[in-house]
């Protein structure tokens, strides 16, 4: 039997025994809980997929399996319901998840990495505490329209981190959140224009160039 001909539950359990869950997709009101999983304790997932009034998809999935699993689940969900995917924020994951059917996202990562001085830019993610930014008087990302990029330089934010000023994390969080929102806005417009693949190639080609 081809893997795709197997029921979703079997595919998920056999392919991703430690991370994924089986979901009783035929019952939209069913709320999955760990005790409902027919898996040995050491194979239980860390997070749970839920299907309630809203359509939610969640789980600690391995990066390389994200699109495959989201595609499986999306194909079995009602076409007229939104699909909400938790914990996704890297640009390649966003494009893969959208292509596989995800509609909306939320994730702590943009703010979490910002608190550790990691910032997104069109040409990739970098750490602003690097010595090269000590006297760099350009914004975090000169293509960004956020408050931070309009008012602060890399050099100043670099200084704030070195001085352990809490404002550093706030400013970088504002930027990273705005970066992701702008990216999703771009994706939405590209889908409407029929240019999703072109946008993906363009954005990811720049972001992961190094
Ligand atoms: Zn910005």
Image (cartoon, rainbow, N blue to C red):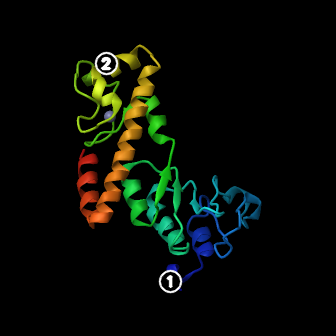
Residue highlighted by disc 2 = 156
Q: Closer to the N terminus: mark 1 or mark 2?
A: 1
Q: Relative to 76, is 99 above or below?
A: above
Q: Which circle marks residue 2 in the picture?
A: 1
Q: Is residue 187 left or right of residue 74?
A: left
**Res 187 quadrant in image:** bottom left
Secondary structure found at label 2: helix
Q: Relative to 4, is 175 above or below?
A: above
Secondary structure found at label 1: loop
Foreground residue among 18 and 32: 32
Q: Relative to 16, is 6 above or below?
A: below
Image quarter where the C terminus lies is top left
**Res 172 quadrant in image:** top left
Furthest toward the right, the residue is 35
The residue lying at 35 percent from left, 42 percent from top is 179
Ligand 1 placement by image quarter: top left
Neighbour tally class for label 1: few under 14, some 14-19, many 20 plus, Cα within 10 Å: few
Q: CA distance from mark 1 to mark 2?
A: 57 Å
Q: Relative to 76, is 173 above or below?
A: above
Foreground residue among 72 and 11: 72
Q: Is residue 43 left or right of residue 98?
A: right
Whole-percent x, y for residue 141 in the image: 27, 35
| Mark 2 C-beta to ligand 1 under 8 Å | no
Mark 1 vs 2: CB contact within 8 A: no
Whole-percent x, y for residue 147 in the image: 34, 30
| Mark 1 C-beta to ligand 1 under 8 Å | no
Q: Which circle marks residue 166 in the picture?
A: none
The residue lying at 58 percent from left, 56 percent from top is 59
The residue lying at 47 percent from left, 36 percent from top is 111
Neighbour tally class for label 2: few under 14, some 14-19, many 20 plus, Cα within 10 Å: some
Closer to the observer: label 1 or label 2? 2
């Amino acid at each position: 039997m081809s893997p795709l001909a197997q029921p979703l539950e079997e595919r998920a359990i056999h392919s991703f025994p430690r991370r994924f869950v089986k979901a009783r997709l035929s019952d939209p009101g069913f709320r999955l809980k760990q005790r409902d999983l027919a898996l040995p304790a050491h194979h239980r997932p860390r997070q749970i997929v839920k299907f309630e009034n809203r359509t939610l998809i969640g789980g600690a999935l391995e990066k390389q399996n994200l699109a495959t699993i989201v595609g499986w689940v999306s194909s079995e969900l009602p076409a007229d319901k939104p699909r909400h995917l938790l914990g996704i924020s890297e640009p390649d994951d966003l494009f893969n998840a959208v292509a596989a059917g995800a509609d909306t996202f939320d994730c702590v990562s943009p703010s979490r990495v910002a608190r550790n001085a990691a910032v997104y830019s069109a040409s990739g993610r970098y750490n602003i505490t690097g010595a090269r930014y000590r006297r760099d008087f350009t914004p975090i990302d000169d293509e960004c329209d956020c408050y931070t990029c309009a008012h602060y330089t890399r050099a100043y934010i670099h200084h704030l981190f070195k001085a352990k000023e809490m404002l550093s994390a706030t400013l970088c969080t504002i930027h990273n959140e705005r970066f992701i929102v702008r990216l999703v806005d771009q994706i939405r417009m590209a889908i409407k224009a029929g240019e999703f693949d072109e946008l993906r190639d363009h954005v990811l080609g720049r972001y992961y160039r190094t």
